[in-house]
Amino acid sequence: MTPPSWCERLAIPPPGLFVAGTDTGVGKTSVACDLARALRARGVDVGVMKPLATGGPFPGPDARALREAAGCDDAWDLVSPVHFETPCAPPIAAAREGRPVDRNACLRAYRRLRERHATLIVEGIGGILCPVTATGTLADWIGDFDLPVALVVPSRLGMLSQTLLCVEALSGRALPLHSIVVNHISSGPHPTAREDATFLRERLAPTVIGERPYDAMSDKHATHYK
Ligand SMILES: Nc1ncnc2c1ncn2[C@@H]1O[C@H](COP(=O)(O)OP(=O)(O)OP(=O)(O)O)[C@@H](O)[C@H]1O
Ligand SMILES: [Mg+2]
């Protein structure tokens, strides 16, 4: 298997990475799958997880894509322990479906997967401050996973502010930032794409800034988020 070449600059640490994003639809699953494929190509035993998922039947498309990329056969209840069918933020889906967002179920599944795999790639939900309960956000839960964060940022106008907001949210909670992945998600023009990536490199040094290229094949299935 040929590993996705953009991953080569990212040294993925053995316990793994928590892949978070500035927003929904920015490429978290795409990045997480590439990271899992890159590890697999190096012969690393990699597990994957989407602890919180909303939208459509169980297991959702993210969990399916992640498990296929990692080539593992962990039970869906471990890969995707908390799933709601309503496509919205978890507390709103939970209220509609009449059951709580079960933090302990996420942690139990995470611990099981940590025992099974040398490295885990965990995908978050929405953006960093996506509400996960009535009062808590994803950022409040990331620390439970004990993994450094790879932050996925879409290369488009507004990305600098979104990135800096997310970096503040992480540092304010003392959550370690491993890297930023600038995802060239759109074929449309972003005239300052180069300068924006360079700005982040200089402003956030020594954080590694990776760049995932535009992928026309993947864009065929793209949603309205761009
Ligand atoms: N570099 C890229 N080039 C072209 N299309 C891309 C790229 N990265 C992601 N996409 C497409 O953009 C869409 C959203 O990507 P993805 O599902 O990975 O985002 P996400 O952040 O995981 O979304 P969600 O918040 O729903 O979990 C998908 O259709 C994906 O194929
Ligand atoms: Mg996703």
Image (tube, rainbow, N blue to C red):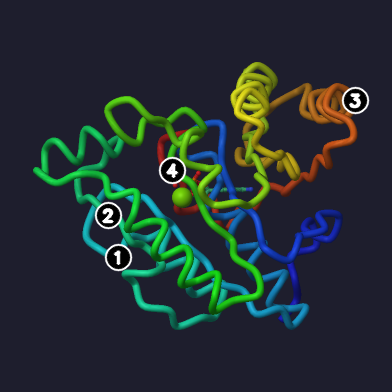
Q: Position of residue 139 (x, y in %)?
A: 51, 34
Say whether residue 107 is visible: yes
Residue at left 46%, top 66%? Answer: 65
Disc 3 crowd, CA 10 A, few/some/many (<14, 14-19, 20+): few
Q: Position of residue 193 (x, y in %)?
A: 77, 28
Residue at left 56%, top 38%? Answer: 21
Q: Secondary structure at mark 2?
A: strand
Work out whether mark 2 precedes mark 4 in sequence or the reverse, and give the earlier one: 2
Q: Secondary structure at mark 4?
A: loop
Q: Amino acid at mark 2?
A: His
Residue receiving disc 4:
125
Q: Is residue 101 left or right of residue 109?
A: left
Disc 4 crowd, CA 10 A, few/some/many (<14, 14-19, 20+): many
Q: Are marks 1 and 2 in contact (CB under 8 Å)?
A: yes
Distance CA(mark 1)–CA(mark 2): 8 Å
Q: Secondary structure at mark 3?
A: helix
Q: Secondary structure at mark 1?
A: loop
Q: Which mark is residue 59?
A: 1
Distance CA(mark 3)–CA(mark 2): 39 Å
Q: Amino acid at mark 1?
A: Pro
Q: Which mark is residue 202?
A: 3
Q: Amino acid at mark 4?
A: Ile
Q: Amino acid at mark 3?
A: Glu
Q: Closer to us: mark 1 or mark 2?
A: 2
Q: Which mark is residue 83?
A: 2
User: Cβ of disc 4 within 8 Å of ligand 1?
Assistant: yes
Distance CA(mark 3)–CA(mark 4): 28 Å
Q: Are marks 2 and 4 in contact (CB under 8 Å)?
A: no
Which quadrant of the structure image shows residue 98?
A: top left
Indicate whether 15 appears above or below 173.
below
* Badge count: 4
Q: Position of residue 22 (x, y in %)?
A: 56, 31
